[in-house]
Image: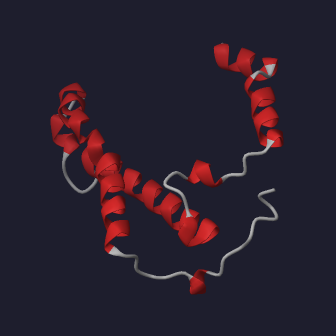
Amino acid sequence: ELIFHEKFSHLSLPAVTNFSGVTIAAGGLMYAFEGQAMVLALENRLKMPSDMIGLTGVLSTSMNVVMLIYAFLGFFGYVTFGPSVAGSLTLNLPNSGYLFWRDLYNYNDPQLTESSAS
């Protein structure tokens, strides 16, 4: 079903959204960076707390990785599903029985569960 999904031309998509879209994006970004509450716990566990800050420090690197993941998923989700994209990309996937049974089978596959248990 996903193979035959209607493709959008990225040139036909609007470059800028309205104010409502900006506020929704800001909420998502704040949620993404909410993990900063763990900063002090991470700093206390480091052998050298000075590694926490700086251009290549733990904090800068982790926040940049989170930002890149969110930007990647947001950009390609928008290009794939167009302006009618739902708040979560998984809500855009088709609700078909095939995907459900395939995932259920893969989840209960004995070879997968044995290898992950050891």
Q: Which quadrant of the structure image shows residue 25?
A: bottom left
* Location of the C terminus (image quadrant): top right
Residue shown at 60%/48% (left/top)? 90
- Lateral position of residue 113 relative to residue 50, left or right: right
Residue shown at 57%/53% (left/top)? 89
Horizontal and vertical percent for residue 71?
44, 62
Q: Is residue 49 visible?
A: yes
55 shown above or below 102: below
Front residue of 96/32: it is: 96
* Location of the N terminus (image quadrant): bottom right
Q: How many numbered markers are drawn?
A: 0
- Residue lying at the far bottom in this picture: please name it: 11
Horizontal and vertical percent for residue 117?
65, 14
Its colouring scheme is secondary structure
- Lateral position of residue 111 relative to residue 58, left or right: right
Residue shown at 52%/51% (left/top)? 88
Front residue of 8/59: it is: 8
Q: Can residue 57 be seen in this view?
A: no
Horizontal and vertical percent for residue 110?
80, 17
Front residue of 1/63: it is: 1
Residue shown at 22%/36% (left/top)? 37
Horizontal and vertical percent for residue 23?
30, 63
- Lateral position of residue 39 relative to residue 94, left or right: left
